[in-house]
Amino acid sequence: MDLGEDSAYFRDENVFAFEEPVMFENGRVPSDIAPDLDLVHLRGQGQVLLSLPGPLRSVAVRLEAPVTVPLTHLVGWQGNLTPRVVPLLKSASGESLRTAVELGGEGFALIALGVR
């Protein structure tokens, strides 16, 4: 993926490599219901090589229409988005069985669906 002039946040496990001019910063989204979401913030001109289970796709996120992405499909995001780890599926006792990331703001969610 070519970053161009944009910056992007990626799940740490999806970043395989990036070119030297690209600057990075590690971070995380804390969660009470799942392990924290480890991230890499990449910015600058250059390319990043991602390790994905399928093709990379983008989904528009708007202020009036937040997007919730299952954690298993989330690669990252671009734009002015605020992430929040949320339950996707709960057991009868209220325990989180599957988690997702809700992205609010203006930008794009980056997702990859596994190839079957």
Image (tube, helix red, strand yellow):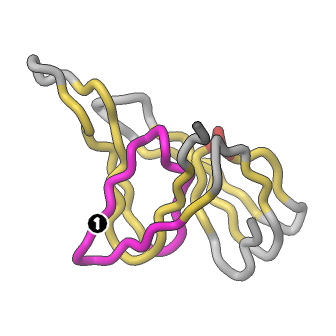
Residue positioned 17% across, 21% down in the render: 91
Q: How far from the left and from the top, in percent, is residue 40?
A: 63, 51
Q: In this view, does 84 lie to the left or right of 49?
A: left
Reading the image, the residue beneath label 1 is 66
The quadrant of the rendering that contains the C terminus is top right
Residue positioned 29% across, 32% down in the render: 32
Residue positioned 82% across, 56% down in the render: 18
The quadrant of the rendering that contains the N terminus is bottom right
Question: Is 91 rendered above or below residue 68?
Answer: above
Q: Residue furthest right?
A: 20
Kindly identify the amino acid type of the residue bearing the numbered disc 1: Pro
Name the quadrant containing residue 67.
bottom left
Q: How far from the left and from the top, in percent, is residue 63?
A: 28, 77
Is 51 included in the stretch rendered in magenta? no
Q: How far from the left and from the top, in percent, is residue 21?
A: 87, 68
Question: Is 24 rendered above or below residue 28?
Answer: below
Question: Magenta region's main secondary structure?
Answer: strand
Q: Residue furthest top?
A: 93
In the image shown, does 21 or 61 lie closer to the viewer? Answer: 61
Q: How far from the left and from the top, in percent, is residue 84?
A: 33, 51
| Start-end of magenta stretch | 58-80
Is 64 included in the stretch rendered in magenta? yes
Q: In this view, does 90 lie to the left or right of 67?
A: left
Q: Element at badge 1?
A: loop
Residue positioned 22% across, 77% down in the render: 64
Total labels: the figure holds 1
Question: Is 94 rendered above or below residue 112?
Answer: above
